[in-house]
Image (spheres, rainbow, N blue to C red):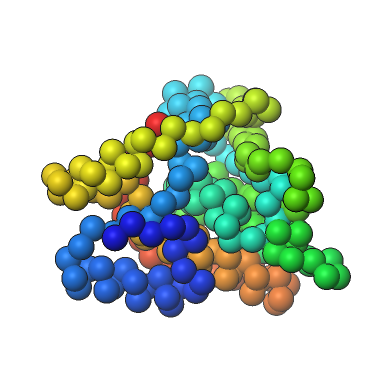
Amino acid sequence: MFVEKPLAATTAECDEMIQAAEKAGVVFAVHQNRRPDVNFNELLDVLESGRLGDPQLIRISLPHAGTARDWASHVVDQALLLGRGNLVQVRGWTQYPERASEEQGFGFMELEFEQRPLVIMEMIPGRNDSGTAFPLFYVAGDKDFYTTPCEHQWPNMHPIYDGLYRAIREGAPTPVHPSIPRNVIYCFELMEESSRQGRPLPADDWLPAGPFMRLR
């Protein structure tokens, strides 16, 4: 079963789908097709090289997307892959101007994990003719810092389909395990509720993530 992102509208629906796939014994993967992004993989290379030292803060800015769970789900998915350990709490803020759609809403999400880095995301709206949304990454380590270049390239989608083929034919892990896309929806729910309550909320319903496959 290969599902488009976002995985579902609510965390409860995500859990129902995951449980149904496990009960049926079928391969279940989610098409988070921005994991192979060139700038995201360059960032992973830099982090793995150790030249930044211990990462303390990662700030991700996503223009032209707003708080819609279509485009913005990509950057939350990437953010969850950059965290270390389980998610502890989420602080969120949202603002929708009058007559605004989700694509025109402003969003802020702060993810605190068991270990640093603290991951902060900005979801910024744009008009329909604003162009394609590519996230910008800013990373502060205890030795150095890094920012992604402004020039971006469309990702190579073949690794997703190659990984899906191996999962079906060879029993390999799925290229995008559904636990993380499920947690993406959970983070959106926490962001919106945190904004309403005006305080950070504990991630008590966090689902430990399945295996992460590097796609490039």
What residue is rendered at 49% in x and 61% in y? 6
The spot of residue 7 in percent (x, y) is: 44, 63
Looking at the rendered structure, the number of numbered marks drawn on it comes to 0
What residue is rendered at 55% in x and 44% in y? 117
In the picture, measured across the screen, residue 145 lies left or right of residue 127, that is left
Farthest residue, direction right: 98
Query: Looking at the image, is 33 positioned above or below residue 197?
Result: above
Q: Quadrant of the N terminus?
A: bottom left
Is any atom of residue 107 visible in this view?
no
Query: Looking at the image, is 187 positioned above or below residue 129?
Result: below
Q: Nearer the viewer, residue 146 or 11?
A: 11
Is any atom of residue 19 visible in this view?
yes
What residue is rendered at 22% in x and 68% in y? 22
The spot of residue 47 in percent (x, y) is: 48, 30
Q: Which of 139 and 8 is in front in this view?
A: 8
In the picture, measured across the screen, residue 102 lies left or right of residue 143, that is right
The spot of residue 115 in percent (x, y) is: 48, 49
The spot of residue 45 in percent (x, y) is: 45, 27
Query: Looking at the image, is 159 positioned above or below residue 24?
Result: above
What residue is rendered at 23% in x and 44% in y? 165
Q: In which quarter of the image is the C terminus?
A: top left
In the picture, measured across the screen, residue 97 lies left or right of residue 137, that is right
Farthest residue, direction front: 129
